[in-house]
Amino acid sequence: MKRFFFYLFAGSAVLLAAVSCVKSEIEQDEFPVEIGFRAVTDLATRADPELTGASLGTDNDYVIYAAASADGSPKYFDPDAASYGGQLFAYFIDGAKWFPASGDGAYTKQHIYWPFGGVKVDFLAYALTPAAKEALAPTFHSETHAREFTISDWDTFSNQYDVMYAVANGCVPGTDGNVALGFKHAQALIAFTAKKSATTTVDLTINKITIKDLEYKGTLTVDNYRANLKASWTISAHGDKDLSSAEGIADFPYTLNSTATQLTTNLLVPEQSAKQIVINYSMGGKTFDYELNIPRTPWEMGKKYTFNLEFSAAEITFTTSLDDWSETVDNEQIG
């Protein structure tokens, strides 16, 4: 954008001479560039119980809330000073990216621009569903918004929401003004599959699955103050948990067949040391408890742990698979 300033020095008697006295000055201003987000690879996908499609942006109702702090402006985004809930970003198909949006239900686009003068901006964001936002009420740091966000006193067993977080520090606008964000999961994912062996003819039923002394409630803090982004849990409650009472779990008792079936539509838990797991099952009119002998290694954020059970009349065997709870997806697909 160019602005032209013309200074004319002319009197009524020397009008023609004034043409040669024109002093012109041209100033080149910076172009205003809108802030937007574009998700990058290693994004959480359909392993999440709520994520119905293949991407964060286009196939579901996830939204992003972002905080921003700039040099001299620790609250560069400050739309809601009362709750420090962050600036809403919603995915708009017509622009194929995340735009600042109003929270009026229609998600109308807003316009927020990068600061001039090469000022660097730090961004801290979380992604979740509107229902999770309302239930969990995350808050950014009250003074320097991009420093941290917190979800306090979160009962993850009763509120099975997937929360993802991302950071991008020291940013200046690129060619399109977009900030690349790679989201990570704030919890671990636990899943179970079960079947009976092909040669087993007796009826086998799983009655319940209990995780002993599960750490299920606490405060999540995503800290962007240190050189390396750190997410951590402070646990406030633990105890035995019957998975049949959790959200998104298959109906129990469950009768096994020879095809492996996932019994839990995923269980989201805070990061913690692996816990004792007890399977209560019935066979031939009798009921038994079977304890999985699993290593006491940590259940880490962003990891999916699947326990694959196979029952026969003589024994129970199980294997454990560990996966990164994400997959690489095309940048254009995820916006």
Image (tube, rainbow, N blue to C red):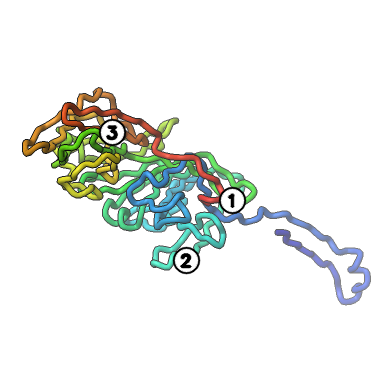
Q: CA distance from mark 2 to mark 3?
A: 46 Å
Q: Position of residue 305 (x, y in %)?
A: 31, 34
- Residue under circle 3? 308
Label of residue 272 in the image: none
Relative vertical location of residue 267 with respect to residue 7 in this rendering, above or below = above
At 16% from the left and 47% from the top, the residue drawn is 252
C-alpha separation, residue under disc 1 versus residue under disc 2: 19 Å
Q: Which residue is mark 2?
A: 108
| Rendered location of residue 255, percent (x, y) | 18, 44
The amino acid at mark 3 is: Asn
Quadrant of the rendering where the N terminus is positioned: bottom right
The residue to which callout 1 is attached is 177
Q: CA distance from mark 1 to mark 3?
A: 46 Å
Q: Quadrant of the rendered structure where residue 314 is?
A: top left
Q: Kindly check if marks 1 and 2 are in contact, taking CB atoms under 8 A apart as contact.
A: no
Which of 272 and 252 lies nearest the eye of the viewer?
A: 252
Q: Using residue 15 as the reference point, say whether residue 301 is left or right of it.
A: left
Query: In the shown orientation, is residue 9 left or right of residue 52?
Result: right
